[in-house]
Amino acid sequence: MTRTGFTRLTAAAAVMPAANVDTDVIMPKQFLKGIDRAGLANGVFHDLRFDAEGRPDPAFLLHRPGLEDCRILVVGPNFGCGSSREHAVWGLLQYGIRAIVGTGFAGIFSDNAANNGLLLVSLDAEAHGRLASRLAVRHTPMTIDLEAQRIIVDAFTLPFEIDPRRRRAIMLGLDRIGETLAHAEAIRAFEADYRAASPWLVRPAGA
Amino acid sequence: MPSARTLYDKIIDLHRVMPLNDIQGPGEQLLLYVDRTVLNEYTSPQAFSGLREAGRTVWRPEAALGVVDHVNSTAPDRTTTAPDEDAQRQIDYFARNGRDFGIRIYDVLHPRQGIEHVVLPELGWVMPGLVIAAGDSHTTTYGAFGSVGFGIGTSDIEHLLATQTLPYTRLESMRVTIDGPLAPGVTAKDMIMAVIRSIGAAGAHGHALELAGGAVRSLDVEGRMTICNMAVECGARVALIEPDAAIADYLAGRPEAPSEALLDRAWQSWSALRSDDGARFAREVHLDARDIAPMVTWGTSPDQALPIDGTIPDPASLPATERRDAERALAYMGLTPGTALETVRIDRAFIGSCTNARLSDLRAAAQILDGRTIAPGVRAMISPGSSTVRREAEAEGLDAVFRASGFEWRQSGCSMCLAMNDDVLAPGERCASSTNRNFEGRQGTGGRTHLMSPAMVAAAAVAGHLVDVRRMSERSPA
């Protein structure tokens, strides 16, 4: 899928410090029944955002004044753990979240984010703590400059590291499958040698 | 290439089509050849739609197998009617994708239908030294065979189907060694729960986790699958156990395993599939199997677990970083600090899932349930891991034991492990469960899950509360 990228994002940021926020919580099971990617904005944190009658809970973080147009989450460790459901990333993007800042993201969630242009920034615990406490004071807008690899809040700036391939993909919105298929000849050549050396991979006749 | 390599690095080296950066070792980016995948009806539809929209084909259709497992009904009498219209649409689209792209699909009525990670090994599709990526986090299961198995999202399913490869970043390796004999009544489930408790829900984050030591080697292949399956709950992206003679025995005679002659030839290569002496592990952890007791979770993260003879922890006594999460978990679970775990009453009992619903798991549960009945007011269900497991259990008469005890003997599917079908906890209901995740809402909005081994679930169902299974296995039933 070809996407459009971004290099600089300025928006309100919400601080969600809990550890191990899993993809069941980010996108509950009742939103996994589609065969397309649509309609998932309402599912994001659904069971925390809405009560049993479907009324929004005004106390939920993202419903608080100043965070209506939140585009950035600052989260606790191991965000996105659990199920592989990419619906969690699709839903976050559809809700409007474009970037998440944490200390470490679960592996599958991280790959899903990269495949969809959702920027994940990992900071060390000390820098993350300073950022979170600064944002907790008031919902001041935060800027993520992907070009300069810096987070800016008021006069406070923090550098961050990011994998160059992922950074380029977020900025340019690349077609990853198309990139791999450019190597189709190399894949074919590898496959021929590999399968010749591993004859047990041939499925038995009739199976 | 370093001279002493880990098992993980050897398998990745065998599957490297080409490098994608200049780094050697962890952090190396490469194009990784994937041997096989298994597809399900809920994470694959958008991948097939993506292929259709781009006009792409599937690179090697015979390298994929599709199994309906997540949304189907597990009602005791098999029905093709899905629990709801949306589930039916996913099942129908799955069948159509199989037809249009030449991929074999096991639908609900297929005699080998079951949970994907139970079905693939049963067929003989999982062998040492493979790379298997699939759209489900519990793909780590295949590490039990000495294969690199890892979960991927839908975009990467599409990538894999179109190219038979994935852009991949080589992981650091980590090793957990569990030595010493396992105490009676302690299972593979308790071992992996003890590991998760010990290192935390992110303890193996970003690592390929090798599990080694005498206690791991002593497990049968199904127990090894339980361990590798649940390793994802401590953040491991890959779990691995060195393949040995137990794997050879397991593969022999499987319907789609290679012929004996080819297997003999394969073992000449597979015997090299072990971590070399001196191979570098970023982190090593040692546990003594004798210290492991039957485990249960008390919170909403798999690392919030304790031996069954423990008491609900007081968040105030926990490190500051864990306190708020523990307070929140106890509020959700409706539990009070200081309560003995064995006094916590349950409403539901569930034996199922890709973690613990294979034949050996059902035998262990039946051993507890034989001659006993479940406590009044408890609803108990068993959903076998596959239709094959169901038939094998019936051939041994296990179904009669379950029915006589008061358990519902259901059809196969993911069922109440993640409650995508109509097997759901009501808000506030408390369930003893042989599954893998105790997340908030996992088994139903407001549902409360306690993870444990299948025998511990059976024991809890009989007692009506969490209980140490060793009390029941010590003496014959009354």
Image (cartoon, coloured by chain):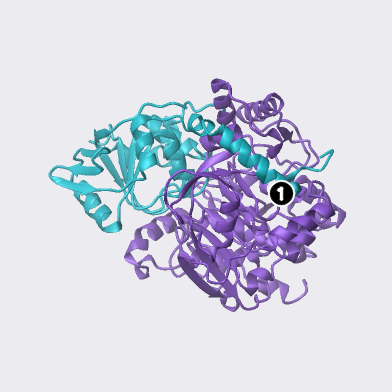
Give the residue at mark 1.
A198
Q: Quadrant of the C terminus of chain A?
A: top right
In percent of width and height, residue B54 lies at: 54, 22
Q: Chain of mark 1?
A: A
Front-most of residues B195 and B364: B195
Q: For numbered disc 1, what is the local secondary structure? A: loop
In percent of width and height, residue B450 lies at: 56, 58
Front-most of residues B271 and B322: B271
Is A14 placed above or below A126 here? Answer: above
Is B95 placed above or below B443 here? Answer: above
Label 1 packing within 10 angstroms: few (<14), some (14-19), many (20+): few
The answer to whether residue B348 is seen in the rendering is no
Q: Quadrant of residue B240?
A: bottom right
Q: Is residue B270 left or right of residue A187?
A: right
Which chain did the image draw in cyan? A
The amino acid at mark 1 is: Ser
Q: Is residue A37 left or right of residue A142?
A: right
In percent of width and height, residue B175 lies at: 53, 66
The answer to whether residue B323 is seen in the rendering is yes
Residue occupying the point 72% across, 30% down: B81
Q: Is residue A97 left or right of residue A13?
A: right
Front-most of residues B446 and A64: A64
Is B160 placed above or below B381 here? Answer: above
Residue occupying the point 68% across, 32% down: B82
Which chain did the image draw in purple? B
Is B59 placed above or below B440 here? Answer: above
Across the whole image, how many numbered discs are drawn on residues?
1
